Image (tube, helix red, strand yellow):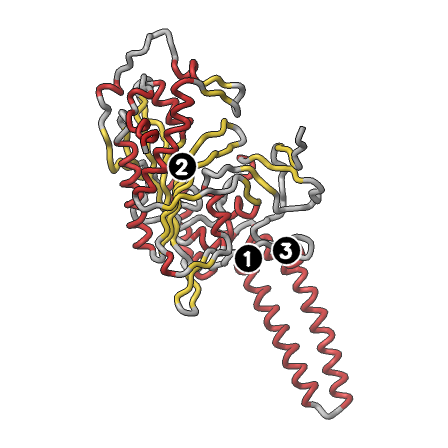
């Protein structure tokens, strides 16, 4: 039997940040990257920040954040003053011809050095409290298309007559019949469910490829710093225990699956691309693992553009490809603009694809597409250059389809493989 060098286990709580390491922690832990801290943009307009927090109903204490910001700036200014004072003393020592004066200046330099050392040690706690625990928790700016309250339907396809009624025997539930669940995180598919789970992601990926998207293959594992960069809860992911892992290690390994945004971010971390490589249109099919639900085959799209306007245009192009896919399914669905309170902290704007569940007379979310501005790029150091100036691409990303939810809806509304003839074309290509 092959012995694996790791085992899956529940998450342990990690009190230190893996995304931002202060100088004292960097002595013991390896800092993978240093996120770009745009203090001016985030804190330059406090009224805009407070409005953003209010509209999102986001749990961030702005007053406490501002106090920490003032303390952090005060400490940084004091450090610069002492450093400049030491430079001035060094110049005076070199210029002085009096040994007595030189000795006095050297004594002052020693005191200044000790003061600076003590201040630096104190500054680590200040920086950790402000940057790691507060500043990096500030959410993305809201896009003008994001509604303040209530989802806004921007497109709706009516329910086809075939999807509205089911011809299955009333005493047979195809979902329970073809999806056997063994606990919350394990199920077994048979029949049409198994075929759909195989072919739906293949067809969806091929559709995006035909629309100028590049097929990608992503890793299933990511480190903690990427989970923090995407502001995803570590408790929602499986944690992988590595051999000889130090007890105080903060940059741990997590299982997310290649069909997730996290796996894309791993590729673009600390990546510098030529402006001519943008815009990017990528698509990846793979598993998505979640700590409290069964794994699912998902299709994840990722795009990047040099400008905000270009990224929004790319966003709208991707939405049209989503429509091409869902228009071919014999279901009714709608595309809704998600309101500010329902956005993730990293998102500036998002649309959800919701299929109408005729059996339960409600709409169920099966896909999404988000616009992240340059928020994620700054956190993972994904850059391009204009001359000697460093710029951050604007990113869009989303789940084009999640096979598990989609299959449950299709089977539950009496739709079988025979009702999805486009999936059979894969065999002939």
Spot occupied by residue 230 in the image (x, y as percentages of width and height): 48, 45
Mark 3 and mark 1: Cα distance apart in space = 17 Å
Q: Are marks 3 and 2 in contact (CB under 8 Å)?
A: no
Spot occupied by residue 402 in the image (x, y as percentages of width and height): 40, 31
Mark 3 and mark 2: Cα distance apart in space = 42 Å
**SS label for mark 3:** helix
Which of discs 3 and 2 lies nearer the camera? The answer is 2
Disc marking residue 125 = 3
Disc marking residue 299 = 2
Which of discs 2 and 1 lies nearer the camera? The answer is 2
- Name the residue at 66% across, 77% down: 86
Q: Is residue 159 above or below residue 353?
A: above
Foreground pick, 64 / 213: 213
Foreground pick, 347 / 324: 324
In the picture, measured across the screen, residue 116 lies left or right of residue 398, that is: right
- Name the residue at 69% across, 69% down: 115
Disc 1 designates what residue?
Answer: 34
Mark 2 and mark 1: Cα distance apart in space = 30 Å
Q: Which image quarter: residue 48?
A: bottom left
């Amino acid at each position: 039997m092959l012995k694996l060098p790791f085992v899956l286990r529940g998450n342990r709580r990690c009190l230190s940040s893996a995304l931002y390491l202060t100088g004292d922690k960097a002595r013991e832990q390896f800092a993978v990257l240093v996120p770009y801290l745009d203090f001016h943009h985030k804190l330059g307009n406090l009224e805009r920040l407070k409005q953003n927090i209010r509209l999102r109903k986001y749990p961030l204490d702005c007053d406490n954040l501002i106090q920490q910001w003032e303390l952090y700036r005060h400490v940084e200014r004091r450090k610069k003053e002492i450093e400049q004072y030491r430079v001035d003393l060094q110049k005076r020592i070199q210029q002085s011809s009096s040994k007595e004066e030189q000795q006095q200046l050297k004594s002052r330099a020693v005191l200044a050095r000790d003061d600076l050392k003590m201040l630096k040690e104190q500054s680590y706690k200040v920086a950790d409290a402000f940057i790691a625990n507060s500043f990096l928790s500030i959410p993305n700016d809201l896009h003008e298309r994001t509604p303040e309250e209530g989802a806004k339907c921007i497109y709706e396809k009516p329910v086809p007559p075939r999807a509205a009624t089911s011809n299955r025997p009333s005493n047979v539930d195809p979902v329970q019949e073809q999806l056997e669940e063994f606990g919350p995180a394990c199920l077994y598919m048979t029949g049409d469910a198994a075929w759909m789970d195989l072919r739906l992601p293949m067809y969806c990926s091929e559709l995006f490829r035909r629309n100028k998207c590049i097929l990608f293959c992503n890793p299933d594992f990511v480190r903690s710093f990427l989970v923090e960069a995407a502001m995803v809860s570590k408790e929602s992911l499986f944690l992988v225990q590595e051999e000889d892992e130090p007890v105080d290690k903060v940059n741990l390994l997590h299982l997310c699956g290649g069909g997730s945004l996290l796996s894309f971010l791993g590729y673009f971390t600390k990546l510098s691309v030529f402006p001519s490589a943008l815009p990017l249109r990528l698509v990846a099919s793979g598993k998505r693992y979640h700590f409290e639900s069964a794994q699912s085959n998902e299709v994840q799209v990722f795009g990047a553009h040099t400008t905000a306007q270009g990224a929004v245009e790319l966003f709208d192009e991707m939405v049209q490809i989503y429509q091409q896919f869902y228009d071919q399914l014999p279901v009714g669905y709608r595309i809704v603009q998600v309101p500010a309170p329902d956005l993730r902290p990293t998102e500036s704007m998002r649309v959800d694809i919701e299929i109408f569940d005729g059996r339960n007379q409600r709409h169920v979310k099966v896909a999404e597409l988000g616009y992240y501005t340059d928020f994620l790029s700054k956190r993972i150091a994904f850059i391009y250059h204009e001359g000697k100036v460093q710029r951050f691409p604007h990113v869009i990303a989303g789940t084009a389809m999640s096979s598990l939810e989609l299959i449950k809806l299709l089977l539950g509304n009496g739709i079988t493989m025979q009702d999805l003839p486009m999936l059979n074309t894969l065999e002939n290509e």
